Every structure is written in structure tokens, then in C-alpha cells.
Image: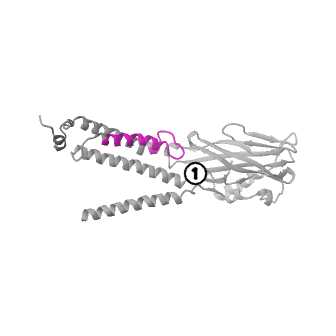
Amino acid sequence: MAKKHFKRIGFAAGSLSVLAAFLLLLFSAGSSTYAATPALDRDYTKTGTPTGGKDVVSLELAVTNVDPNSSAFAIIATPRLAGSYGSVLGNGSLVETPLQFVFDAYSGQGRWSNDVAEIAGGMDIALKLFGDVRDYPFDRYNSYLISTASDISTKNPAQTGLYMQDSKEVVPGFKVASELFSVSADDKASKKLIASTIEREQVIGITGVKWTIERSFDTVLTVLLMALLMILGAVVSTLITIAIIRGKRPPSLNSLGWLAAFLFAMFSLRTQLPGNPPNGILFDLWVFYPVVLVLVLLIAVTVTSWILRDDWDMANPVVAIRGKRDE
């Protein structure tokens, strides 16, 4: 009776654990977030510059792609002009003063210019993602944008001031946060000094934006559940093999089939990791490779036990079932 009672408790606990894991995964499905500092939430074309000016050159930033596998971070910068510089349209701005934007791009085009009466649309900018994908799923990244704007209506370009607005486009599978940073101030300087330096840089048309990126909670949870599945499968396979070695279960083709099927399922399960990470990540070193190695060893032990069976003669099934066959 006690054994049955413990079995019922174990079954109930297992069922509740599976249900809790499912509910946790379900309610964490919207954990991809985007946060920006108040300075990047402001629409300067409506509120004016911090110095009170109404002639505004600003850029609305939208993250379009985060690819840790190739260390790539892509954004679209859309001009939002006001006053003598232009007027805002649905997907860009109508230019009234010739402008030039320069971006510290990682690859591709980094210089854009627009003439009078042109419509300035979104500009694709490729940035570098700094971080190590091998720490997956606990990898963390940074990316930086430094940009300048100038009035090129005369032979000597004049500084216009440059302000940023973040549209906070959510990137599935990631938690993203953005903030302004000072291009010229020392990182070890006081917060007050850095803030005042950022304001001065904006006035002269130089602005820096920093992004911090990490995996969303639902991505991390999915990876941990897959790791738990692999580990539990390896534990169950080990228990089966131990039972065979101790003679409590026969080394049959069914057990070999289970081990082989589970081994090949591991590779299929590995390809389903969110974000399609490359080989050699933290997950592989601590979970996937050890589980595969354990399964290969268990298959070798089971095959050896099956080959060395003394009851292979199925022409004498009764004796075969009872133990070693008669000589």
C-alpha cells in the first residue's frame, strides 16, 4: 500500500510540474520587451529642442534585426524635421534645407544627403553587435550608433543640432534597452557631467545611442525546458541500461531501438533551439554533447549485452525465457 501511495504522489507531482512548466511558458510568451530612456521617448518636432529652438533635425530610430550569430544589428533611421529644416510626413520628412547625415556604420552606406524639396525616408544602418553568442542562452550584447547632421546649403557645412527618438520596435526573442551616451566624455565621469556633455553634443549635431540586448525570458525558459528534457531522457536511458546489466530486464532489440531513436531525436531537438545558435555554445558544452556521449555509451553497452546473450536460441523458447539454454 505504501508503494502505491508513493507512486500516486510521484505521478501527481510530475503532472503538476508539467502543468506548471506549460503555464509558465504560456504566460511568458510576451516577454520580449523594449525600453528606452525618457530622452529617447520625446518627439522633438512637437516639443522643440531642450534649448527652446523650433528648428529641429531629429532621427526616429527603429531596430529591424538582431543577429548574434553574425554579430549584426540593423536599424532604420528616419529623419523627422521641423521649422526651417522641413516638415514631418507619414514615412519621412520633406526637406527644406539641404542636409547631410553621417553614421558610424559597421558595413554598407554611412553617409546620406538630401536636397531641397526631396522626401527623406528611412535610412538602413548596419551596426556591430558586441558580445559572445557562446554564452547562449545567457548571452548579452551591446551596440552603438554615433551620428552627425549638418547643413550643406553653403560651401562650409554648418552644424544643425541632432536629436534622437526611439520608436521602440519590439524584437521577438530579445529584451532591448536603449539610452543616450556621450561620444566625448569619459565613461568614469559623473552622471551629471555625462548628461551635460550629451546635451552639448546634441546642440552641435553629434549624438550617440547605446543598445543593450539580451535573450527574452520565454527564450531562456524554452531552452531550459529543452535541456531538462534531454537530461531526463539520458537519466531514463541510463536506468534502463542499468536494469539490463543487473539482469532485471533482457537486452532486447526494443531497448536498442529506444536508445537509437532517442539519440537521433537529440539532434532534431537541438535544431529547434530559439534563434538557431551555432555549434559550440554553452548549451552544447553542458547539455547536448554530454547527453549524446552518454547515449552512445549506453548503446554500446546494450549492444554488447545483446550480443553476449545466452538465450538467443528461440527454437527453445521455454528454456530461453527461464535462463541459459541447455547444452
Q: Residue furthest front?
A: 315
Secondary structure mostly taken by the magenta-highlighted segment of the chain: helix
The quarter of the picture where the C terminus appears is top left
Query: Pointer 1: what residue?
Result: 174
Which one is nearer the viewer's eye here, 229 or 184?
229
- At horizontal 41% and vertical 51% (from top left) the residue drawn is 228
Where is residue 120 shown, x and y percent of the image? 80, 45
- What residue is at 19 percent from the left and 36 percent from the top? 315
| Kind of residue sitting beneath label 1 | Phe
Picture quadrant of residue 46: bottom right
> Compared with residue 114, is residue 44 higher up or lower down, i.e. above or below?
below
Left or right placement of residue 321 versus residue 12 in this view: left
In this picture, which residue range is highlighted in magenta? 254-283
- Specify whether 323 is left or right of 56: left
Residue 214: in magenta span = no
In this view, the residue in front, 194 or 324, is 324
What residue is drawn where x is 69% and y is 42%? 125
Q: Name which quarter of the figure residue 51 lies in.
A: bottom right
